[in-house]
Image (tube, rainbow, N blue to C red):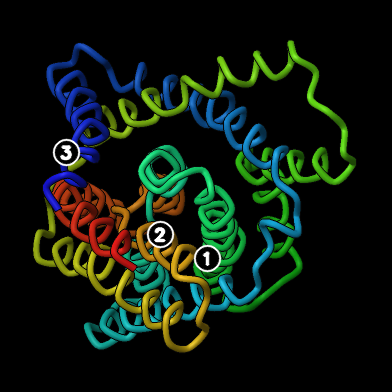
Amino acid sequence: MLAIFLKTLPFFAIIGLGYWAGRTRFFSQEATAYLTKFVFYFALSAMLFSFSANLSLHEVLNWTLVWAYLFGTAAVYIIATIVALIRKLDIPTAAMEAQCAVIGNVGFLGVPMLVLLLGEDAIGPVMLVLAVDLIVFSSLIVILITGARDGRMSLGILRTVGLGLLRNPMIMAISAGLIWSALEIPIPAPMNEFLTILGAAATPGALFAIGASLASKTAERVQIALWLSSCKLVLHPIFVAIGALLLFPIDTYSAGVIIAAAALPVAGNVFILAQHYGVAPHRASAAILFSTLFSVGTVSVVIAWVTQL
């Protein structure tokens, strides 16, 4: 346990450094926004393309794993939604709370940390988790919010969802890499060096950006934030474990990877969605802040457990 904690500590230390830079205004909100954009569109995309270009679709696509992760995530999504509706929240707010309960920081934190801690074989399962989050649940929240406001489903909603997926650089990078791999085109040495150098900036850049962005987050609605953080850090990995080990059993290594991915704190893009649609941005902000803070300990516990599987 201590050994795992010491391995995860440098990742959270960089997040802490970014938080200090943002809190002291050494790094302005504008600088954080541009760093995030660089990581999102360039460095992380280069890393994901490089990873996926060296895999085959046959190696990556594991439908049993997808069903196991979908089960665990959908179960917690439903629990969070029911609790929100019992509190008489409207559909958009309930959907936003459910999003906080299940969408982890897989892209910025999970990809670099889990691949380093659990080995390169973790790349495939982590990418599947990322794809499910982006394709299924990031689409679902747009459908629920827009549909609730319009009072009906329309082709316009589906068009918005489709364009959103096409514009997401992580989806595009993974897809392009798998297509490149399927065509069996060798990556030229200069291109490989380019991707390696650019992709190497993803890990420190993403972690620093997470910390700097946390500096602008508020701690309002503390009780709700603690509930949503508990859903994300505790319930989500538990239900994914039930799915991966009992209901849709997969090999223990892949199960450990997706359980660890489920234990990650709430993703920053949930706040971006909340702000964009004007739906509960303060509770999303607080959930990100608290879940990231508590994940320093909980992620280490979960990773220590899955390494014993």
Q: Residue at x 52, y 31 (%)?
A: 40
Q: Secondary structure at mark 3?
A: helix
Q: CA distance from mark 1 to mark 2?
A: 8 Å
> Which residue lies under the disc numbered 3?
6
| Marks 2/3: CA–CA distance | 25 Å
Residue at image point 25% right, 88% down: 86
Of residues 156 and 174, the one nearer the viewer is 174
Judging depth in this view, the residue of 101 and 302 nearest the camera is: 302
Specify the quadrant that holds the C terminus: bottom left
Per the rendering, the mark at residue 236 is none
* Amino acid type of the residue tagged 1 in the rendering: Phe
Which comes sooner in the sequence, label 1 or label 2? Answer: 2
Q: Is residue 80 left or right of residue 130?
A: left
| Crowd around label 2: few <14 · some 14–19 · many ≥20 (10 Å) | many
Q: Which residue in the structure is indicated by mark 2? A: 103
Amino acid residing under circle 3: Leu
Q: Residue at x 29, y 53 (%)?
A: 265
Image-based side of 302 in relation to 81, left or right:
left
Question: Dot 2 lies on which element?
Answer: loop
